[in-house]
Image (cartoon, rainbow, N blue to C red):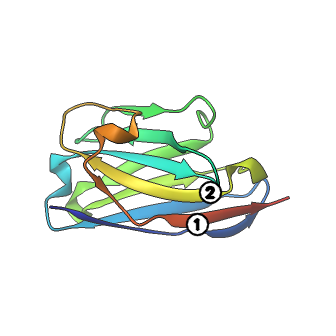
């Protein structure tokens, strides 16, 4: 088992930046590929970004490519999502997730463990 806790969300103006963090406990984070997803009210959970166990391979949704950066610090058992130039349409709950399999998947069903979510609100 691994427990994931997100932090760093909040209210930001359009065009602003936020950095989300995901802290893991219970298992060594370097064993897992990690992903970030987001879910707006009444909508499905969408893929945002993924990173492999070592951090050398990343994968992004087209909508965030060039603005968001996923990274990890295995020594601290943490994963991060730097979000720049945010838009109001990106208001959502943001979730980090851990995948036991060696892949950078964009499918929520491929991930084994989830955090509780962290709200990000982008005002216009």
Could you tell which of marks 1 and 2 lies nearer the N-terminus?
A: 2
Look at 15% across and 48% down and name the residue there.
31
Q: Mark 2 sits on what residue?
A: 92
Residue 37: x percent and y percent? Answer: 48, 47
Residue 106: x percent and y percent? Answer: 41, 33
Categorize mark 1 by other alpha carbons within 10 Å: few (<14), some (14-19), many (20+): some
Look at 64% across and 56% down and name the residue there.
41
Give above or below for 104 relative to 36.
Answer: above
* Residue 5 as seen in the image, left or right of residue 113: right
Q: Residue furthest right?
A: 124
* Residue 36 as seen in the image, left or right of residue 44: left
Residue 74: x percent and y percent? Answer: 23, 55
Quarter of the image where the C terminus is located: bottom right
Q: Mark 1 sits on what residue?
A: 119
Q: Are marks 1 and 2 in contact (CB under 8 Å)?
A: yes
Q: Residue furthest front?
A: 42
């Amino acid at each position: 088992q691994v427990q994931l806790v997100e932090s760093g969300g909040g209210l930001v103006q359009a065009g602003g930046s936020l950095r989300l963090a995901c802290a893991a406990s219970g298992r060594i984070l370097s064993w897992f590929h990690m992903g970030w997803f987001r879910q707006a009210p009444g909508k499905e959970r969408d893929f945002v970004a993924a990173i492999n166990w070592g951090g050398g391979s990343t994968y992004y949704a087209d909508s965030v490519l060039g603005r968001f950066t996923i990274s990890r610090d295995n020594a601290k058992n943490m994963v991060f999502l730097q979000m720049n130039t945010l838009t109001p349409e990106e208001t959502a709950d943001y979730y980090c997730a851990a995948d036991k399999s060696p892949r950078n998947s964009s499918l929520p069903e491929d991930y084994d463990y989830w955090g509780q979510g962290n709200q990000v609100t982008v005002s216009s």
